[in-house]
Amino acid sequence: MEEEGIEESSKRFLDSSASGGGGGDGESSRWVDGSEVDSESPPWSLMGDEEIREGYGSVRRRLAKKPRRVDSFDVEAMEITGSHGHHNKDASLWQTFALAFQTLGVVYGDMGTSPLYVFSEVFSKVPITSDVDVLGALSLVIYTIALIPLTKYVFVVLKANDNGEGGTFALYSLICRYANVNLLPNRQQVDEHISSFKLKLPTPELERALNIKETLEHNSSLKILLLLLVLMGTSMIIGDGILTPAISVMSAVSGLQVRIAGFGTDALVITSIVILVGLFSIQRFGTTKVGFTFAPALALWFFSLGSIGIYNLVKHDVTVIRAFNPFYIYLFFKKNSIKAWSSLGGCVLCITGAEAMFADLGHFSVPSIQIAFTVVVFPCLLLAYMGQAAYLMKHPDSASSIFYESVPDRLFWPVFAIATVAAIIASQAMISASFSCIKQSMALGCFPRLKIVHTSRKLMGQIYIPVINWFLMAMCIIVVAAFRSTSDIANAYGIAEVGVMLVSTTLVTLVMLLIWQTNLFLALCFPLVFGTIELIYMSAVLSKIKEGGWLPLVYASFFLCVMYIWNYGSVLKYRSEVREKISMDFMIELGSSLGTVRTPGIGLLYNELVHGIPSVLGQFLLDLPAIHSTIVFVCIKYVPIPVVPQEERFLFRRVCPKDYHMFQCIARYGYKDVRKEDHHSFEQLLMESLEKFLRKEALDIAMESSLNDLEIDSISMRSRDSDVHDGDGTGDLRVPLMQGQRVEETESSIPGGSLLNLPVSAMSADEDPSLEYELSALREATDSGFTYLLGHGDMRAKKNSLFLKKLVINYFYAFLRHNCRGGAATMKVPHKNIIQVSKTYMV
């Protein structure tokens, strides 16, 4: 069974090298069994097998397994200056206010332009026949804004950030740190030592959290369900990135139909498309420049909303403040029944863009978003809606165009110009949120690799993805050209918004129970209150599926399929690599020459394994006449945290005995990390870190040897009646650990083997001839140059697989792999130094 996943080239490699094995049992020992879990295994002794078999006794065998720390990933990386200037969340007060000002143009544009169309949509379903209709609708809007954006997001959801990052994938990453629910089996215990993990200490609620953790980890169906929930939420955010620009731009331009005669639907569509093209064209300049450009306009817009609202309240009917009494909501539903429920589809538009507060968190900070909403956005929106309601109390026939009707005549054109600019800017919030979510999903292995442009040297969360930008633009143009009105787009808009909110409510509830370990009653009140409200809104907007509501469902289903297929294929590929990795016994049989010729130089073999020797090495040994004198297995690994500190970037481990000169290196990155270093910087950093590892290894061995000497001295004092002879096995306990390997290497370079009687514990790491020899060989290999060894892996489903699996792997996943960004571009390696071999994985 274990040989089914091994491709023909691997079998050929096994057969060609079996001469040194010894019969049929060598096959099972050379290749790792398919059921092995790819995790940290106990470090194998660097002493030769024959040395252990000489019978040094149980104490000797115990000491041979002792130096675990020598073979662990414990090397700190050297810092590349300026490569990770990520956003400092402990910013000064001035910086916080500056970021709060930027949020007006990036985060709150969508919610800020909702007064343009909320009451128009609400009263298109419920005609105004009494004051109860106006006061009931106003009360619904007030409490919807107060409960969802203010209470839920500002005071609760924003606190569930992942070290300052928001969005559904940030919540998923947070959950993955506390429970092993990630379907990709590359989790390592050593990752928990990264300072950004911030795992909490036990609390009285720990038992409940542990039960939830165990349930999630041992139920594969729940893992898949959780992933699908996260992918659905992300897909709907991307869908918002399509619908928000479409409805915002069309709402702005539609005002011209009121004042300009002959400005028909065709002119509306063409003008909207031109503006959309210009809007998406400026995204490449980055969030900071766009935010500072848009923020003054939105600040003026919110000031206009508040001022006009106060004017209408004072002039028309200040008694609409009665709507703060929620009893009017009951009267509204009692009077209008089914029509009132249908009007909820329009009422939900007052909170469109609320998810951007959380999804765009990585671009800003929690205090800046909280300050901007509570000080500016929330008061101005309440005044705007109350002013419109006061106008409707006197002029109920103006509901279809209430916003422009409520503006004083002398201020109409200035306000129209500001409203047009604000509505165009509103789309910026979900465009930025889409970029952030896709970047996170790529890092966590749930989206095909795409080019990411980091638009800010200071704020690492501000990014631009060209392919997604132009895709969103194309979809927006199609939506505008196909629907040709804002009514049907509004029906579609509500489904996407409420869907994302339901996903956030579910994930934050899980965070409360598993991570925050909140009191059970309080934790259940959160989904009970907010989930109930959102389900009521969802029931209202789902009734509009035939009137345009199908559109976000189509978009969400498309992105959901893309992300799940990519994650499914990536997990199968990784498990196949684990199943086919080369065993240590086989490497020992090959010898230090690896069955070929070792030439000067360093070969960086990129692979995805976090532990073990990848099977693609066998393909290189078959295809190349020689292999480099030093080989480093490089694994670019993304861990479920936003940022990995520079000093915790690299992990090193020695592979095989010293004379093989083979090492394993894991370069860890967070899903928000910026990989700006070029290959020259990476090579320099890698070699400095490797040299540091070798020195640390020699120092640890020397310290371990000193401890052994002390232990042996204690044993000798207790057994003073026993005489120790030179040839005795017990006398050999004084020989430092791993000296056998050191002697084998130094004897060939130093005549006479003068080091045989020199204990390593008597000299420092710098004076160890074995270390100096290895460092000299490493520098010589570095001077000879670097070669990047890449494996181009194709995946095929096994012949006995189900038809659906064959369809997904052989066609859909293969199409995504062939059209996403290549490995050389993703890993930032020079094309002129690449050697690539092809390999097929049968999954």
Image: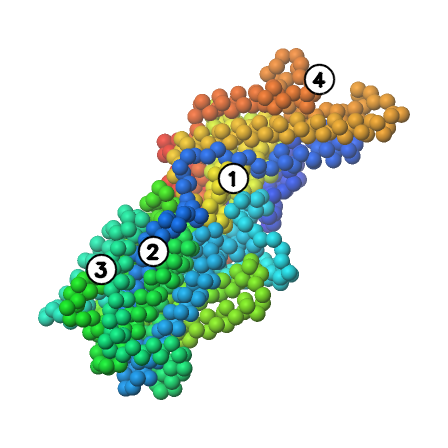
**Tag shown at residue 103:** 2
Q: Secondary structure at mark 1?
A: helix
- The residues tagged by marks 3 and 2 sit, at their Cα atoms, a distance apart of 16 Å
Task: Tell me the amino acid under the disc marked 1.
Answer: Glu
Residue 100 lies, with reference to residue 59, above or below; the image says: below
- The residues tagged by marks 4 and 1 sit, at their Cα atoms, a distance apart of 39 Å
Q: Determine the residue positioned at 52% across, 30% down.
A: 690
Q: Determine the residue positioned at 24% across, 64% down.
A: 304
Q: Are marks 3 and 4 in contact (CB under 8 Å)?
A: no
The residue to which callout 4 is attached is: 757
Q: Nearer the viewer, residue 599 or 641?
A: 641
**Mark in the foreground, 1 or 3:** 3
- The residues tagged by marks 1 and 3 sit, at their Cα atoms, a distance apart of 46 Å
The residue to which callout 3 is attached is: 421
**Mark in the foreground, 4 or 1:** 1
Q: Determine the residue positioned at 61% across, 53% down.
A: 201
Q: Nearer the viewer, residue 285 or 27?
A: 285
Q: Determine the residue positioned at 71% across, 33% down.
A: 64
**Mark in the foreground, 3 or 4:** 3
**Mark in the foreground, 2 or 1:** 2
Task: Tell me the amino acid under the disc marked 3.
Answer: Val
The residue to which callout 1 is attached is: 648
> Which of pointers 2 and 4 lies earlier in the amino acid sequence?
2
> Counting other residues with Cα less than 10 Å from the Cα at mark 2, is it few (<14), some (14-19), or many (20 or more)?
many
Q: Nearer the viewer, residue 286 or 276?
A: 286
- The residues tagged by marks 2 and 4 sit, at their Cα atoms, a distance apart of 71 Å
Q: In this image, 109 relative to 704: left or right?
A: left
Q: In this image, 273 relative to 500: left or right?
A: left
